[in-house]
Image (cartoon, rainbow, N blue to C red):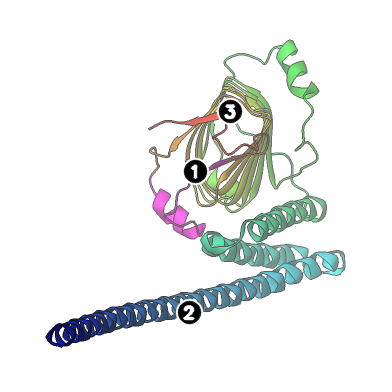
Amino acid sequence: MRKLMELRDYHLRFAMMKSHECYENYMSFRMSSEREAAFLRLQEERLASLEKRKAERLEAHTDELQTFLSKFGLLHHKIEDKLEVLSEESDKKSSLGTMQQLLQQLQLLLNESVASLPAYDLRRSQDVVTSLHEKIAKAQQTCLPKKKFAFKNKKHITTTPVTEQVNQTTHHSKFSKYTAAVTYENRSNETFDLPKSEIYKQDVLLRNLSHCHVRLETVMGSLHCTNCTNCTFSIGPISGSIFLENCDYSVYHVTCQQARIHTTHHAVFHIHVTSKAIIEDCTKLRFGQRSVFYEGYEKDRAEAGLSDTNNWNDVDDFNWLNKEKSPNWEIFL
C-alpha cells in the first residue's frame, strides 16, 4: 500500500512538473508571438509611412513638373505666335526684341529646373529652346539683315593655305544650315576679341577658323562653332547651348547651360555646365573645371541665369551605351 502511495505521489509530481513546464513553454511561445506580432506591426507601420512619404514626394514632383511644363509651354507658344505674325508687324525690330526677352525667360526657367526634370523632359525642353534660338536668329537675319561682322585693322600673320580651306569646306557640317545674328568665318592665325556690343545676348556662329585665339567675353544666347581647329576660345556665359562640330585640337574655356559636341577629336574643355555635356562621334576629349575667368564674369553668369551647379565631369556619349564610362573622354584636375 505504501509503495502504491509513493508511486501515485511520484506520478502526481511528475504531472505537475510537466504541467508547469508546458505552461512555461506556452507563456514563452505566447510572449514570442506577441513580440513578433508587435515587430511585424511596427514594420507595416514603417512601410506604410515610407509609402505615404514616397507618394507625397511623387505628387509634389508631379505638381512641380506640371507647373514647369505649363509655364514652359505658355512661353513657347507666345514666341511661336509672334514668329508667325512677324512678317505682318510694322515694327519688326521691337517684335524681335520682345521675342528675345521671352526666350531669355524661357531659358532662365529651364536653367532653374534642370536638377529636377526627368531626362526625357529635359532633353525635349532643351531641343525646344535650341530650335527657338535658331528660328529667331533666322527671322532676324531675314527681317533685319546685317552685314557679316568684320574687324578693322586686323593683322594677318599668314593666309589660310588653300589645302586647309578645302579641308574646312569639304567637311560635312550638321551646323552648316544655321544662321546667326553674328557670323565670323574663314580666318587663320589671328588673335581677336568680338566686341560685346555685337554679341551681347546674341546667337553667334564661328566657322572655318584655324590657329586663332578668340575672346567672346560677355553673355550670349548660343554659340555654334564648326570647322574651328587648333584654336583657343575664352567664352562668356551662354544662357543656352554651345554647339561644336569638327573642332579638333582646340581648347575651350566656356560656361553654358549645355554643351553639344559632334565629330570633334583631341579637344580640351575647361567647362562650367549646369546641365551636362553631350558628345557624339568624338574621341580623345578632356574635361576639367573652368578656372580662368575675366573681369565681370560672375555678373555675366548671374545675368545668363546659370547657377553654381557644375556637371563638368558628367558627360553623355551617344556612341557608348555600356554602363562603364566611355573611353572617348576623360577628366583632368
Which mark is drawn over residue 57? none
Q: Judge from the rendering whether residue 25 lies leftward or rightward of residue 186; answer left or right.
A: left
**Residue 195 position (above or below residue 24):** above
What's the residue type where badge 1 is placed?
Glu
Which mark is drawn over residue 48? 2
Secondary element at tag 2: helix
Residue at point 15%, 82% (across, down): 3
Question: 207 or 107, which is in the foreground?
Answer: 107
**Residue 286 position (above or below residue 297):** above
Q: In the rendered structure, does residue 160 fall within the stretch colored magenta?
A: no
Looking at the rendered image, the disc whose residue lies closer to the viewer, 1 or 2, is 2
Secondary element at tag 1: loop
Q: Judge from the rendering whether residue 308 lies leftward or rightward of residue 268; answer left or right.
A: left
10 Å crowding of disc 2: few (<14), some (14-19), many (20+): few
Which mark is drawn over residue 328? 3
Quarter of the image for residue 63 reads: bottom right
Question: 264 or 298, which is in the foreground?
Answer: 264
Instruction: Give the CA distance from mark 3 to mark 1.
Output: 29 Å
Question: 123 or 321, which is in the foreground?
Answer: 321
Q: In the rendered structure, does residue 304 fall within the stretch colored magenta?
A: yes
10 Å crowding of disc 3: few (<14), some (14-19), many (20+): some
3 and 1 marks in contact (CB < 8 Å): no
Residue at point 42%, 40% (across, down): 290
What's the residue type where badge 2 is placed?
Ala
Looking at the rendered image, the disc whose residue lies closer to the viewer, 3 or 2, is 2
**Magenta part of the protein: which range?**
295-315
- What residue would you read off at disc 1? 217
N-term-proximal mark, 3 vs 1: 1
Secondary element at tag 3: loop
Residue at point 30%, 81% (across, down): 31
